[in-house]
Amino acid sequence: MRFVVITGANGFIGRRLAAYFASKNFKVYAVVRKKAAAADFFSNMPNIAVIEGELRDYEQLACQIPLGADALFHLAWSGVSPEARNNSLKQMENVRLSLDAVQLANAVGAQRFILPGSTSEYCYCGQLINETAVPSPQNAYGAAKVSARYMCESLCREKGIPFIYAVITGVYGEGRNDNNVITYCIKELLRKQAPHLTKLEQRWDYIYIDDLIDALYLIGTKGREGAFYTIGHGDNWPLANYIKIIHANINPGIPLGIGELPYSGDKLPSSCVDLSSIYRDTGFMPRVAFERGIKNTIEWLKNQLENEEET
């Protein structure tokens, strides 16, 4: 049976990716820091082996994984919430752990090392994000992602491991419940409160979680060695467009609050993506329009808020 290794398998993306590979008859070695936290989610899923441990102990982890992994996806990354993205010390720890993940890939003979990046690395590049874009990070999180990319690519070259970098745009969907602008606006509107927002003129892109998982699976099975892929939906709208769709789907009678807050800087960031490389190499095309995916997300968050009120 073919198999993959996924670090950070207990996260929002990791859980879904592990379940998807398992459904495709891959054995999945799901690496997590605390096994108990993943037990409920993975308990009844065939083809998934949950492995507890720290990436710095990659030799011990490797003893629990057979040789010849089709791919290792390094998804483990702390400090991804908006309020933690400027914690420079925390972000730099992630670079070290990313190098440990390469060592793990080497120890299990992985045929691909796939490192997800973020459009936060390219917020001021002035073009669609693709392999020609020049890094211009928005925060410490973006800067650490840039560093991890080049450091991991160098170590993969040294170890002879095919390296693939995949920059992911904004992700939304059932299961994500941090303080990003999408979740913030949904929660405020569900509570019948007006969100407080800037003019939201920056151009942005969002991808529904199911489409992201499909893209990562295709990269893991068809991705080209040395490739730089951008994963998104390709709408590249002004951010206000997304928020207005959310507003229309919850309660258009509530004031929206666009323009109430000043921008934090003189230059607007952007997150516009070029999907031509991933389509050419893997055939990936997003299937879920924002209008449809956001309805599912709103319903899930509505249930979360109702459960919180009950407890």
Image (tube, rainbow, N blue to C red):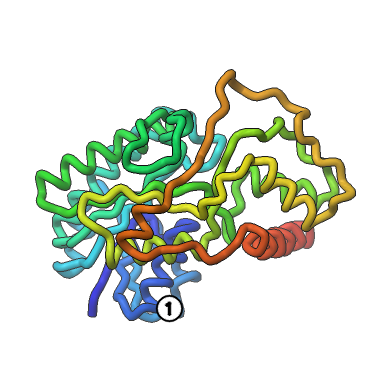
Where residue 14 sits in the image (x, y, percent)? 42, 60
Residue 70, placed above or below residue 271: below
Q: Which quadrant would the N terminus be assigned to in this image?
A: bottom left
What residue is drawn where x is 45% and y is 80%? 44
Q: Could you say whether the residue bearing mark 1 is in a helix, strand or loop?
A: loop
Where residue 76 sits in the image (x, y, percent)? 37, 50
Viewer-side residue, 309 vs 269: 269
For disc 1, the neighbor class at 10 Å (few under 14, some 14 to 19, many from 20) is few
Where residue 127 sits in the image (x, y, percent)? 44, 35
Q: Is residue 271 visible?
A: yes
The part of the image, by quadrant, that contains residue 22 is bottom left
Q: Which quadrant would the C terminus be assigned to in this image?
A: bottom right
The part of the image, by quadrant, that contains residue 67 is bottom left
Residue at the top extreme of this rendering: 266
Q: Pointer 1: what residue?
A: 45
Position of residue 166 in the picture relative to residue 158 (left or right): right
What residue is drawn where x is 45% and y is 63%? 285
Where residue 303 sits in the image (x, y, percent)? 72, 64
